[in-house]
Amino acid sequence: MSTDRESAQAQAELAQRLEQGVETLIAALRWAVRAAGGDLTEREVEQRVAALLAYLRRRLAGELEVDAYGFDEDFTEHIYLPVLRVLYRRWFRVEVRGIENIPDDGAALIVANHSGTLPIDCLMTQVAVHDTHPRGRHLRLLGADLLFRLPVFGETARAGGTTLAAPSDAQRLLAAGELVAVWPEGFKGLGKPFADRYRLQRFGRGGFVGTALRTRAPIVPCAIVGAEEIYPKIGDLTALAHLLDVPYFPVTPTFPHLGLLGLVPLPSRWIIDFSPPVEVADLGAEAAEDSLLVFELTDRVRETIQSRLHVLLADRGSAF
């Protein structure tokens, strides 16, 4: 009899702890939704919390749906974008211009300047497109192979819509009508010193233009102001970069001097601007083999972005 009472008491204590755990989880979700969602009403907060709880139930039940590239739309909508949204809205206070230049449906290739030491500009562009486009389109990023060699980060990026920056993958995504983004400066732009801020580096050999021509996808130039100031690169530990097999190991005013605290980005004000698309459909897929045409289009896109950067910098005023 005593054993039955002890068992019932243990079950009651377990149920109480589970109830407290659920209440703590719901309270944490409410806080996270408010932090990421801006000025939401209580009803909107509760609706989003309910959606998150439904998402967690699906995960616990093993319901998982990804495409051929590893993109997990359920994870992206409920975890990936809401986490990034805190930086986007609260920290960088991103302003978006020209979102009407991104088509409502069908393929388009967004081409942007790259900067900031770490590729946070790519992530903020993803949020900008999804949150301000009337159709809430998902932006599929093309990432360097280094990203996919990193544990956790590589898997998370792939689930959030990033795939390897290979022409074959880019062409398949565009052929399927996806919205794809590329940063053709690569590590040359991302890791340039602060003294060269907002000066575009070479756009490679124009591979993105060839991809757009073969798929007849319009090219949307994108100028990003704000990323240059988040980690001002004032030096480079080259020997350490070689040892770690990375393109550079940056020195900033806060890193590595402040350790992990130095990884907190400075709260610069951002503007992400989408210019009118460069239409290439009428040129035909065979135009991708015309090296002179590819060079001209590459230079045209690059000059468009550079000129927009000058305008946006003047409009923004103070970086902070």
Image (cartoon, helix red, strand yellow):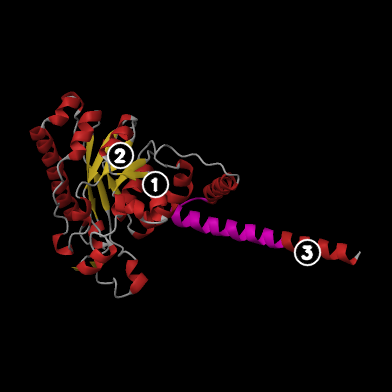
Q: Position of residue 79 (x, y in %)?
A: 47, 50
Labels 3 & 1 near each other (Cβ < 8 A): no
Magenta-tinted stretch? 16-41
Hey, which residue is sitting farthest right in the picture? 1
Q: Are marks 3 and 2 in contact (CB under 8 Å)?
A: no
Give the secondary structure at mark 1.
Answer: helix
Magenta stretch: includes residue 40: yes
Q: Amino acid at mark 1?
A: Arg
- For the N terminus, the quadrant is bottom right
Picture quadrant where residue 320 is located: bottom left
**Residue 57 appears anywhere in the view:** yes
Give the residue number, with chain letter if any, for mark 1: 158
* Residue 44 x, y percent position in the rendering: 52, 47
Quote the CA–CA distance across marks 3 and 2: 55 Å
Instruction: Give above or below for 5 relative to 89.
Output: below
Q: Residue at x 75, y 64 (%)?
A: 13
Left or right, 239 with respect to 39, comes to left
Q: What residue is disc 3 on? A: 10
Q: Residues within 10 Å of mark 1 (few under 14, many from 20)?
A: many
Q: Disc 3 marks which amino acid?
A: Ala
Residue located beneath label 2 in the image: 180
